[in-house]
Amino acid sequence: MEKTVSGVTIELVRGDIASQPDIGAIVNAANAQLRIGGGVAGAIHRAAGPGLEQECLPLAPIMPGEAVITGAHNLPNDYVIHCLGPVYGRDKPESALLADCYRNALGLAEQNRIESVAFPAISAGAFGYPLREAAEVAITTVFEVSPDLKHVKKIRFVLFAESDLEVFGMVLSSKEI
């Protein structure tokens, strides 16, 4: 499924965030120390190789809502943008911090003249953010930021499970352009 808003195409696909060869930068749902971890961070670090963690070490720690950028190492992309999403129920205000992840990641993409960015469902896994609410924040933020994007022309949400894709699809289809 896809929609175009302000010249930016927003796509939803089911797949592996570490296997997006046609995308300039993928986004890592990182931990504060930017280490390998589990889930999305583990998959990205394993695919990128040990050089990614070495490049990340001097950039850590990061706070919820913050984003930093590194090279992609052995991944088929040019960059990895690392965002620390909020832990639901602990990091307040969750929705503002989660929106900051998307806003700050897209800001880094703009600064680096990256034309396409792929996001996972930040905070919706181990950090416990309810998927529907996470999708609302993610897609609403992308719609709000899109008019200001000059370089980014494609934003892809890569969702691991079919059920996640369906939830994001419902949220995207409900948004007015």
Image (cartoon, rainbow, N blue to C red):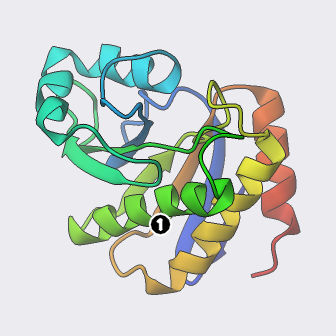
Image height check: is 9 above or below 66? below
Question: Position of 166 compared to 66: left or right?
Answer: right
Is 7 rendered above or below residue 118?
below
Can you give x and y, in whole percent of width and height, for residue 1 in the image?
A: 73, 53
Name the residue located 82 percent from the left edge and 58 percent from the top edge: 171
25 vs 126, left or right, is left
Q: Position of residue 22 (x, y in %)?
A: 38, 44
Q: Do we see residue 7 in this rendering?
A: no
Judged from the image, the secondary structure of the residue bearing numbered disc 1 is helix
In the image, 127 versus 151, the foreground residue is 127
Residue placed most toward the observer, 3 or 98: 98
The amino acid pointed to by label 1 is: Arg
Tell me which residue sits at (38%, 54%) in the image.
66
Q: How many labels sit on residues? A: 1
For label 1, count other residues whose C-alpha is less than 10 Å away and answer few (under 14), some (14-19) or many (20+): many
Indicate whether 28 appears above or below 51: below
Q: Position of residue 8 (x, y in %)?
A: 53, 73
Q: Is residue 77 left or right of residue 50?
A: right
Residue at image mark 1: 103
